[in-house]
Amino acid sequence: MNASLFWLLLSANRWVIVIALALVVFGSFMLFGVLKPVLLRSVMETSDMVETVFSGLVGAIITSTTLVVSINQLVLSQEIGSLGTQRSRMDTTMDFYHNTDEMFGEITPASPAVFLRRLIETSEERAHALRDAVADSSNSELKSEVDLYVEDLEGNAQTAYDELEGSDFGSFDVISPALDFNYARKMYDIRRLGDKFGDELTNAQRTAVREMLEAVTMFGPVREYIKVLYIQWSLVKLSRAILYASIPALIVAGGMVVFVDQGTFTGAILGFDTMLWVVSAAFALSVTPFLVFTAYVLRLATIAKQTLTVGPLILS
């Protein structure tokens, strides 16, 4: 995917995207109005086209509250369960934390950003241990492939450290390094190395390979868990943003239906009929809830596409 498009879909501020989309809608309406051979004011004198458009928008904005309810149901469905279900979730979670406690040699961090960083640090430490373990090997091909593996992991790790610096959960900054750290490729490569040179490895080298695989394997479920939490967090933010945007949108659309006719706004601004400015701006404001929905879903859909699998299956 093009880097600029990738940044736009994932990293760009969602409200900036909403404003940009609103400006595109506004500019398109202005362009259509300028290119149309008949003035908008003349059209309003002979038909109720504008009133019909904004009446439809009033209904659509009110109906959008149903979308908000559906989004909240999606989030709540992950949390609602019996006491036994909640206990089972807790037991499963704590079993995993016991495994990571053993791997880290310390209590697993509670912060998602610190947790991810510690996992990557552990992977890097074990990669160095693997390189040290094969340093005395007489097989130059094995040493060369391990060196390439470690260099690739170190490059990914440094990028992830930079992105995690100062990041807080709820922002995309926590998810971004989880996407950039290509653990699926690293799982495949270390399994391939173990299989290719398995007969030539010493017990210490086999242990280093196994521990390396364990570290990158742990990254998969942690990334998925944090991704799911982030998506739930984002869906809550999306539902609130739609409600916030719906109130002014409803006021503007309703005002256009009830109070505006062909004689309400007269004159011209910058050489263009004032009515064209008003209708274009009102339409852009009225569709803002749908633009908010578009901006958030584009990011969530892209995250889902980039993280479809758990394990050494490389889709792209």
Image (cartoon, rainbow, N blue to C red):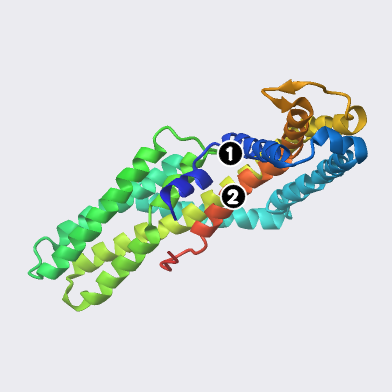
* Mark 1 lies on residue: 17
Q: In this view, does 78 lie to the left or right of 204?
A: right
* Element carrying mark 1: helix
Image quarter hosting the N terminus: bottom left
Marks 2/1: CA distance?
10 Å
- Residue underneath mark 2: 298
Q: Return the residue found at the far bottom.
A: 199
Q: Can residue 2 be seen in this snapshot?
A: yes
Residue at 59%, 36% in the rendered image: 20
Q: Give the percent coordinates (x, y) of residue 29.
A: 71, 39
Give the residue displayed 83% in from the left and 23% down from the top: 265
Where does the image place residue 288, in percent across and percent down from the top left? 71, 38
Residue at image coords 51%, 39%: 12
Instruction: Give the label, 2 or 1, closer to the camera.
Output: 1
- Image position of 66 (left or right of 91): right
Mark 2 burial class by Cα count in 10 Å: few <14, some 14-19, many 20+: some
Q: Are marks 2 and 1 in contact (CB under 8 Å)?
A: yes
Would residue 154 be found to the left or right of residue 256 on screen? left
Question: Relative to 84, is 12 above or below?
Answer: above
Say what amino acid the circle numbered 2 marks: Leu
Amino acid at circle 1 = Ile
Quadrant of the drawing holding the C terminus:
bottom left
Going from N to C along the chain, the mark reached first, 2 or 1, is 1
In the displayed structure, 137 sits above or below 259; it is below
Would you say residue 110 is visible in this rendering? no
Q: Which residue is drawn at 74% across and 46% down?
A: 72
Residue 142, picture quadrant: bottom left
Most foreground residue, 131 or 275: 275
